[in-house]
Amino acid sequence: MSEKVSIEHLTTERQNQHTLNLDELSIHEACQLMNEEDAQVVPAVKEVLPVVESVIEQVILAFRQGGRLIYMGAGTSGRLGVLDAAECVPTFGVEPTMVIGLIAGGQKAMTVAVEGAEDSLLLAEVDLQQLHLTAKDVVIGIAASGRTPYVIGGLRYAEKVGATTVSFACNKKALISNEAQLAIEVDCGPEFLTGSTRLKSGTAQKLILNMISTISMIGIGKVYGNLMVDVQPTNEKLIERAKRIIMAATEVSYEVAEDYFEQANHDVKVAIVMILTGSDADQANERLIAAKGFIRQTKQS
């Protein structure tokens, strides 16, 4: 199949027959109709859960081996990858180099379209080379259309390096699917506003990227119960959240949680293990290392 395939055959580019008269609708009618269209996204995502599960397994394996998760895309797809990567740092306390988002055209493209960047097959290769891509890494190429040259070029280079490659398109039989070991193809139907893939396609992308990053972090011990125990308390709100996480995990009072939070040098995980196991900070840290970061396993050691 040619990379120059006409966009008229793409679901994301088709005109939605249910929304032909948007300019004639009242605000109430438009909101209701948009909500009805958005309701198609969750069932569409559910259909691709088996392949998403396989992707998450590969990401967890990569993390355990010291590898990274690298998203790459152009336009909205690239921005959503950058957003998901950025949110992993405060949520899970990871280094910014562990989950990385690449966007065609670089940082400037987060707010302004960079002409021609997404049409380059070579630009992504350069971006990945600058990251010193290795076979331990997972590269997820995101393109709503499923045909973006920037993503195709990046996946081809990643394959040469030996990295795990994943394509993520919002069209079936996507070109990028031919370039990856695992292919996510979620079809949400034509957009509410013709061709505006920041809408249903963008929502589907956000939902699936949420799954990939969050569940992968669960898989390496970044969560206890449903608490984000590696949260970085970098401001007043997060400091208070950290204390309440300690309270919820150990059923102690606010005052006790605050005391252990200080003893643990503001490390939520260490504070929790101190309380659960009767350890001091150094012993709790040793238990966590032995348990590879899983709090639940420290109670057994």
Image (cartoon, helix red, strand yellow):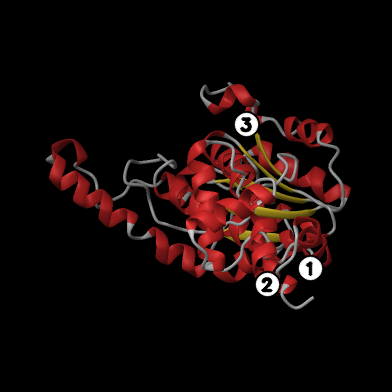
Residue at (15%, 40%) from the top-left corner? 27
Residue nearest the viewer, comparing 191 with 28? 28
Q: CA distance from mark 1 to mark 3?
A: 43 Å
User: Residue 43 appears at what percent x and percent y?
Assistant: 41, 66
Instruction: Specify which label sits upstream in the sequence, 1 or 2.
Output: 1
Question: Of residues 30 and 94, which is closer to you in this image?
Answer: 94
Q: Is residue 208 at least partly visible in the picture?
A: no
Q: Which residue is mark 2?
A: 296
Q: Residue at x 62, y 46 (%)?
A: 88
The label nearer to you, 1 versus 3, is 1
Q: Earlier in the sequence, mark 3 or mark 2?
A: 3
Q: Position of residue 13 (x, y in %)?
A: 43, 44
Could you say where residue 257 lies in the image, as x and y percent from the top left? 56, 56
Q: Is residue 106 visible?
A: yes
**Is 271 left, or right, of 46 in this rendering?**
right
For the point 75% across and 78% down, the residue is 300
Q: Secondary structure at mark 2?
A: helix
Q: Are marks 1 and 2 in contact (CB under 8 Å)?
A: yes
Callout 1: helix, strand or loop?
Answer: loop
